[in-house]
């Protein structure tokens, strides 16, 4: 993989795609094209990784809509809206680098950066400063937005596991794994913060209630 440029901020190339027709029939044989043009089986672990990121992105889109619908009653929720949009763009950046073999990566190609990881940490710290300490694990629920953020969290963990599996057999950018690890934590914090803002009590795990 080519060395990153050390310029501040993000200066990635615009997407090099032109979608004129959705179907191509090229995938009818069970293969998919990587950024470099190579065709690989759709069961390839590389396809599994960025496919799972696509799934995660869709759940975040659903969470954004729930946030928008709830914001007239709870306007503070809108603080999270630009954060989720930013994450959606970053997931596409991660997918771009995962869909590219190391030898085909170019210096200005979209990717995850250390700044992206640090931004998630800062956002977690901001939200977590308003929350009380946990004394047990939390059960998803309390509001639709909370549940959707938990769904996104679990899909994010699955994406992280897929990336770790891919890294065991091929070279991938380690920042992608670090980012997904941090994002899953952030989604957990945001799910708690949503309950705090909306004023819905969290449901804590009680082992005896499952007996």
Image: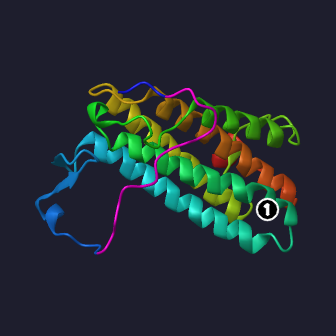
Most foreground residue, 12 or 196 = 12
Judging by the rendered image, the residue that carries numbered circle 1 is: 78
Place of residue 46 in the rendered image (x, y in percent of width and height, measured from the top left)? 30, 41
In this orientation, does residue 66 appear? yes
Above or below — where is 144 with respect to 106? below
The 10 Å Cα crowd at callout 1, few under 14, some 14 to 19, many 20 or more, is some
> Magenta segment: does it hold 141?
no
Place of residue 50 in the rendered image (x, y in percent of width and height, measured from the top left)? 38, 47
Question: Which residue: 55% across, 35% down?
Answer: 179
Question: Which residue: 61% across, 37% down?
Answer: 116
- Helix, strand or loop at mark 1: helix
> Magenta segment: does it hold 14?
yes
Q: Residue furthest left?
A: 29
The quarter of the picture where the N terminus appears is top left
Q: Which residues are magenta?
A: 5-20
Left or right of residue 163, residue 190 in this image: right
**Which is the main secondary structure of the residues drawn in magenta?**
loop
Left or right of residue 26, residue 59 in this image: right
In this orientation, does residue 205 appear? no
Question: Which residue: 37% across, 52% down?
Answer: 51
Quarter of the image for residue 144 reads bottom right
Most foreground residue, 146 or 102 = 102
Question: Which residue: 48% across, 34% down?
Answer: 176
């Amino acid at each position: 993989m080519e060395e990153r440029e050390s310029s501040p901020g993000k200066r990635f190339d615009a997407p090099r795609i032109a979608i004129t027709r959705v179907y191509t029939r090229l995938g009818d044989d069970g293969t998919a094209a990587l950024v470099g043009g190579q065709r690989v089986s759709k069961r390839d672990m590389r396809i599994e990784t960025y496919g799972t990121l696509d799934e995660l992105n869709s759940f975040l889109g659903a969470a954004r809509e729930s946030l928008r619908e709830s914001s007239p009653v709870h306007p503070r929720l809108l603080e999270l809206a630009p954060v989720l949009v930013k994450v959606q763009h970053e997931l596409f950046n991660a997918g771009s680098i995962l869909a590219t073999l190391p030898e085909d990566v170019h210096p200005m190609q979209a990717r995850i950066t250390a700044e992206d990881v640090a931004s998630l940490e800062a956002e977690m710290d901001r939200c977590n400063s308003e929350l009380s300490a946990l004394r047990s694990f939390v059960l998803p629920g309390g509001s639709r937005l909370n549940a959707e953020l938990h769904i996104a969290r679990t899909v994010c963990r699955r994406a992280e596991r897929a990336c770790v599996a891919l890294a065991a057999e091929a070279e991938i950018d380690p920042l992608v794994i670090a980012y997904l690890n941090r994002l899953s934590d952030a989604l957990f914090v945001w799910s708690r913060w949503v309950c705090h803002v909306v004023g819905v009590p969290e449901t804590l795990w009680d082992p005896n209630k499952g007996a």
